[in-house]
């Protein structure tokens, strides 16, 4: 017996489905972060603009690497467990990251927080300290809270950059 696809009327679009979503749960380390970001790109590229996806990847690389480097929890410096969810909506890529690592310092989310202090010249450029200002420049509506020994971070990477718009499909 041969199965046939259901007939559709000419020009009729299928009913809209749920927004494209990406979810992973993993222990935060550099190698796993690279794998998860590659999976995210493969999963969401058909639904999101290249520009918005590239900005999301950069912001998430900073967030996830910060969790792996600074969020190690006692005992014995255990790697934090991260839950990552990204939903592609019409206005942008909505991201939620939770982890069970060390608390995020409040200064990271304040304007100017996390920025290297003092006079910076080419000869005394610090190795780090640019992550949170970079994350804030790439995202909107960033929010953080801590509850029951877990950090909750949410933000949106808007679909609009440089006057170009592309809706998530």
Image (cartoon, helix red, strand yellow):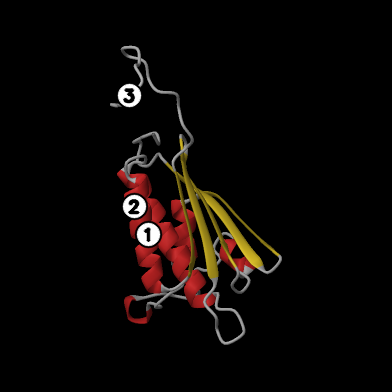
Residue 5: numbered disc: 3
Q: Is residue 153 visible?
A: yes
Q: Quadrant of residue 161?
A: top left
Residue tagged 2: 41
> In the depicted view, which residue is nearer to us: 169 or 104?
169
Judge depth for marks 3 and 1 and give the one in front: 3
Residue 98: numbered disc: none
Residue 37: numbered disc: 1
Mark 3 surroundings: few (<14), some (14-19) or many (≥20) residues within 10 A: few
Q: Quadrant of residue 49?
A: top left
**Circles 3, 2 touching at the beta carbon (< 8 Å):** no
How many dots with numbers? 3
> In the depicted view, which residue is nearer to us: 112 or 155?
155
Q: Position of residue 72 (x, y in %)?
A: 55, 78
**Circles 1, 2 touching at the beta carbon (< 8 Å):** yes
Q: Is residue 127 left or right of residue 118?
A: left
Q: Earlier in the sequence, mark 3 or mark 1?
A: 3
Mark 2 surroundings: few (<14), some (14-19) or many (≥20) residues within 10 A: some
Q: Secondary structure at mark 2?
A: helix
Judge depth for marks 3 and 2 and give the one in front: 3
Mark 1 surroundings: few (<14), some (14-19) or many (≥20) residues within 10 A: some
Q: Is residue 121 left or right of residue 76?
A: left
Q: Earlier in the sequence, mark 3 or mark 2?
A: 3
Picture residue at 44% right of the left edge, 70% below the top:
65
Q: Residue lying furthest right in this view?
A: 148
Picture residue at 41% right of the left edge, 40% below the top:
159
Q: Quadrant of residue 75?
A: bottom right
The quarter of the picture where the N terminus appears is top left
Q: Is residue 93 left or right of residue 81?
A: left
Picture residue at 37% right of the left edge, 81% below the top:
124
Q: Is residue 54 visible?
A: no
Above or below, comparing residue 120 to residue 136 in the picture: below
């Amino acid at each position: 017996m041969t199965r046939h696809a259901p007939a559709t009327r000419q020009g009729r679009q299928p009913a809209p489905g749920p927004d494209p979503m990406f979810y992973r749960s993993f222990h935060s380390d550099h190698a796993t972060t690279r794998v998860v970001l590659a999976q995210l790109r493969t999963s969401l590229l058909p639904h999101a603009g290249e520009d918005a996806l590239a900005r999301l990847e950069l912001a998430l690389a900073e967030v996830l690497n910060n969790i792996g480097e600074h969020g190690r929890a006692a005992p014995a410096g255990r790697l934090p467990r991260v839950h990552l969810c990204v939903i592609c909506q019409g206005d942008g890529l909505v991201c939620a990251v939770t982890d069970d690592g060390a608390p995020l310092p409040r200064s990271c989310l304040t304007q100017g927080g996390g920025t290297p202090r003092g006079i910076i010249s080419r000869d005394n450029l610090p190795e780090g300290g640019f992550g949170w200002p970079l994350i804030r420049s790439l995202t909107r509506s960033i929010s953080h809270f801590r509850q029951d020994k877990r950090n909750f971070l949410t933000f949106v990477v808007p679909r609009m950059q440089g006057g170009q718009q592309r809706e998530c499909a």
